[in-house]
Every structure is written in structure tokens, then in C-alpha cells.
Image (tube, grey):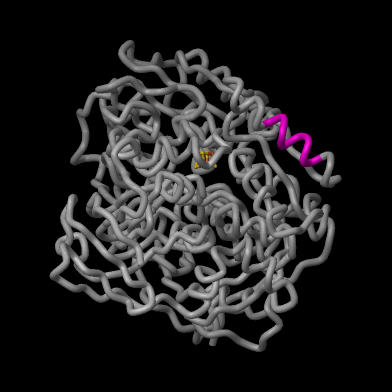
Amino acid sequence: MSTISEKILAAHSEQKDVTPGEIVKAKIDFAFMPALTAALSFHAMYDMDIKKVWDKDKVTILLDHIAPATNIKNATLHKECREIAKEQNLKHFYDINSGVCHQIIPEKGHVYPGMLLVGADSHTCTHGAFGAFATGIGSTDMGAAIGTGKLWFKVPETIKINAEGKLGDRVMSKDVLLKSAKILGADGATYCALEFKGSTISDMSIGARMTLCNMAIELGGKTGICEPDQKTFDFLEGRVDHEFKPVYADTDAVYKQTVEIDSARLEPQVACPHAVDNVKPVTEVEGKAINQVFIGSCTNGRLEDLSMAAEIMKGKKIHSDVRVIATPASPEVYYAAMEHEVIKTLMDAGAVICNPSCSVCFGGNHGILAPGEVSLSTSNRNFRGRQGSTESFVYLSSPATAAASALTGVITDPREA
Amino acid sequence: MIKGKAWNYGDDVNTDFILPGIYLELTDPNEMGKHAMEGIDPEFADKVQPGDVVIGGRNFGLGSSREHAPIALKHSGVGAVIAEGYARIFYRNAANLGLPTLECPNVSKEIKTGDAVEVDLVKGIITVNGEKQLKFTPVPEFMMEILNAGGLRSYIKENRDKW
Ligand code: SF4
């Protein structure tokens, strides 16, 4: 009678079963660090008197948040990361040409069902979309994880998000998640795992499921998980080069709470400043003037997201008061978007295309907002100051809503665009 | 005993408030300390004194896994954080650094900015302005071991065999 999280944690701590609340020491299968946290994690490991990582094939660093370097400080940080990777002889290292960590990790075959994955980034929960237990940790924890191959975990209770029915035209997985954030609140899932279930989830693409799991942390969640299915195996085919054993929840698994989403009746949703749970249906926010639109990030920077934006913008021009920055999450996405003429369509409409990276998402790279400016962003956080000035305003939506709004200059219902 | 002045920032103090994203490129803890709380109170780092206590309401530390946030607090001189509830990653990160994060119901209503606060970690008691006493939720045993060791780094150094 266990949930997916309980089963994975039990298997990795060599126990028959585990109970929520219990603290276990579990073996890690893979660990990754973006540049901004990598150096700190290695400093922590060295401070523990550990000189080498526990397994050089299972630890990686990715230079994704700021790429290419924008000033001397972050250039120095990148340099240190490259030196660490060489010195530690890491098998995998991803430089500034690679894209956002949460897109690269699955694309390069580091994620598989049933695994225990840790990342020194809070959105590591994204990888639960593949049926893994994946969670974000800080640098000291990461120092311990990469130094010893083990870490302690409090076994989380699990909340089930059950989405049934067919999503309407231009209603996306982002809307399902924002609706869940409204229902549960930004701390509604603190210390909990989220399991996404139901026919809506089975119908979703892998990318759409990644969007859901990506934002589990915005509800306080330790991880978000989808059950692996044929779509998962198809995605992993040719990427993961070893056997794995998918893990499923028991039919009598115990959930702390179940949230029901009626997908057929779900409207596009918008998270208003300055909290991810300040969510309203798009019809209540329509008409709000915007200055910038960002389509990208680990939440919505995949081919299907850019394609949705291109479908809406095709043959049209972005409103003259709005700038659009579109950033493919990885080179694989970028190539595919070029092949399908998605990039051309977006550029023809007037969008700026940035290289695969975290881009505008976190306010430390490019696309910074001036005081008083309003952004509509497909990323995952709208905290005050997240994308620049503390006097700016970030709204969050799906790529469909973002693209429709870019054309009109005001927040717009994509179903009417 | 932790002794100092209280700084109350209410509910949902996120990691971008504690240390804005623009400073993530810093690696020197003292430099991070100079920007502590800059996202919500740009004057904090200049005014805070060693031993001062940051007070919060619900979901303190939500957001990023950046350890820069608790590092900045610790190196600005903050002796402890007391809040009604925490985001999971922040809570762990702070304990791993040896910065006590205490849970106390209603604390954001009971303690105002400027109040004199004394925290007795052993007895589990917070004294406000020398009079009022509040109790905080006992720190879980495993966390206490880490705090007592001065953080996870020294804990692992000392307990490598048990790990
Ligand atoms: S895209 Fe944004 S949320 Fe995702 S890893 Fe980068 S900074 Fe973090």
C-alpha cells in the first residue's frame, strides 16, 4: 500500500517499506549541479575532508543559468566549474552551449523511472515526469551527496492531483498546474510529494508532464511524479543505455489528500504578482497591459511550447508596445524548432530568439525588467523582483496565453486569438 | 543563548527576497552577507547586528534551493530565524549550515521589529523584551545533532562511519 515516492525511497535505503515522516538514508543514482551552486557544493564536499566525488560517471555540472557569461564574476564562476569538472574527471559536463539543466538531464539519458535523482536546483522535481523520485537540495546537502553517494530524506506524504477529461483547445498543462496552485496554495504541499494522475495526464505529452512536475516546488512539494507509460519509454529509448525498473503506486496507496481537476471545464489560468498561488482565470485578468513576454525556461521552453506560440503568431505581428523573448530550452529543441519553421514564424512576428539557457527566467541573465514594467512569462516564479526591478510585475501563464497577449499588448484569452 | 533585536518580515519571505538572483554569482559568504534581505529591505544588511533574529510568518524561505540565502543571513550576523512555517529546502539548508530555524506558532504576530529577543535553544524558550515567553516546537533529534555539530560539514567529518 505504498505511493511511488515511498517505494523508491524504500528501495534506495534497502528497506522493505517506509512510512511518511520517517528519516531514511538513501543511495543516490545521479546528482547534478548548475554552475551557480556547483562551486559551493564542491567547497562543501572539500570541507567534509572528501577529495573526490563518489562516482565520476554519476555527477555532472551544467553551465545553464547564465550562458554565455555576462560579467567577470560569473565568467570566473564558469571557469572554476570547468576546472572542477576536469580535476574530478567527470564523465559528463555541459558547457554554455547545452541549454537548461532540467531539459538536458532527460535528453542526455540521465533520468529513468524508479531512480533517485538529486539536483542543486529547486526545480529538480521536473524529472518526476519520468517516474523518478527527483528533488532539489542545497549545496551542503549536495556536498554530502556527491562525496558519499548518500543523503538523508524525510519520507514525504503524497498528495494526489487527479485530472480527468480532455483539456480544451489552447488550454495547456500549465493551466492544470496553476489551478492546482490556486487550490493548494504556495505551501499546500510542503514536505509532500505530488502524484499527477488521471486521463488528462495519460493524454499529455512528456513535455507537458514535465511542466506539471517542474512546478511541484511552487506548491512547496518535495517532488512531483507521473507514472511512467509507453510515452515515457518511447522518450527514453535510445537515450538511457541500461535497464531500469518502473515503479507504480499500489491501488491501495495512502494519500494525504486528493485534488480533483475537471479538465474539460478548465479555463486558461494566470498567476498574478507577486505569488505563484495568486491565480485567476484569464477572463478575470484580460486587458492588463504588458511590456514583455518570455516564452522559455524549464517550465515551458520545449518544442510544443514554442510551436503553440508560433501557431498563434503565424502571419501576425507582435504588438508595438511589447517585446517577446523566446528561448528554446536546449539545442535539441532549437534544432527541431528550426526544422519545423517555428523559429522563423516567431522571428517573422517580431520575437527575439535567445540561445538555450535559463534566459529571462530568474533575473540574473538578460531580459531584465525596468521599474514599473509588466512581464507575462511562461516560467515558474513571479516573486517580486524575480525578473529585474523590485518595482516590476511578473504574471505567469501558458505559452498559448503568452503568445495571444503578445499580439494584442494586453493579457488575452488564447481561445479567442 | 542567542540574543538580539527582531526583524519581522511576515508571510512568504522567499529566497529572492533573502538574496536576489543577481547575487548568485557570488561565492564569498561575507559578500553574500552584505546583500542579505536586499530584495525586501535594502537597509537590513547595514543595520543588522550579530545575534539579531529574523521573524517570519508562513512558508519562510520558499523558492530556490540556493544555499546563498541562508548563507547570506548567517554571514550578515543573524543568529536564528523564527517563523510559523518553512519551505522544505530552506529549512534543511539552514540547519546544514548551523543556522537555527525555529518553528513557533503565531510568532509573526507576537514579535515586532525592534523587540529584544532571547532564544534558549536548550530549553526551547524565546523571551521577548525581557517579559513575554514563547515556546518553539522542539527541533527534530537528527537536526539537533547536525546543529550541535555546527552544521552538516563538521557532522560528516566526525561521523563518516555512521553516514
Ligand atoms: S529556467 Fe528558471 S526555474 Fe528553470 S532552472 Fe533556469 S532559472 Fe531555474
Answer with the quarter of the image where residue B58 lies.
bottom left
Q: Quadrant of residue A138?
A: bottom right
How many marks the image carries: the answer is: 0
Q: Position of residue A133 (x, y in %)?
A: 60, 65
In-image side of A148 versus A360 (left or right): right
Mark yes or no: residue A148 visible: yes
The quarter of the image holding the N terminus of chain A is bottom right
Q: Name the residue rendered at 49%, 22% in the picture.
A: A366
Q: Residue at x 45, y 59 (%)?
A: B99
At 31% from the left and 53% from the top, the residue drawn is B52
Q: Main secondary structure of the magenta part?
A: helix
Magenta segment: A78-85
Which quarter of the rendering shows the C terminus of chain A?
top left
Compared to residue A237, the image places residue A351 above or below, namely: above
Q: Kindly tell me whether residue A176 is visible in this rendering.
A: no
Residue A186: percent from the left, percent from the top? Answer: 33, 56
Residue A161, x across and y down, in percent = 41, 66
Q: Residue at x 63, y 58 (%)?
A: A118
Query: Closer to the camera, A240 or A100?
Result: A100
Relative to A354, B135 lies left or right: left
Front residue (pair A86, A359): A86
Residue A135 percent coordinates (x, y): 56, 60
The magenta stretch spans residue A332:
no
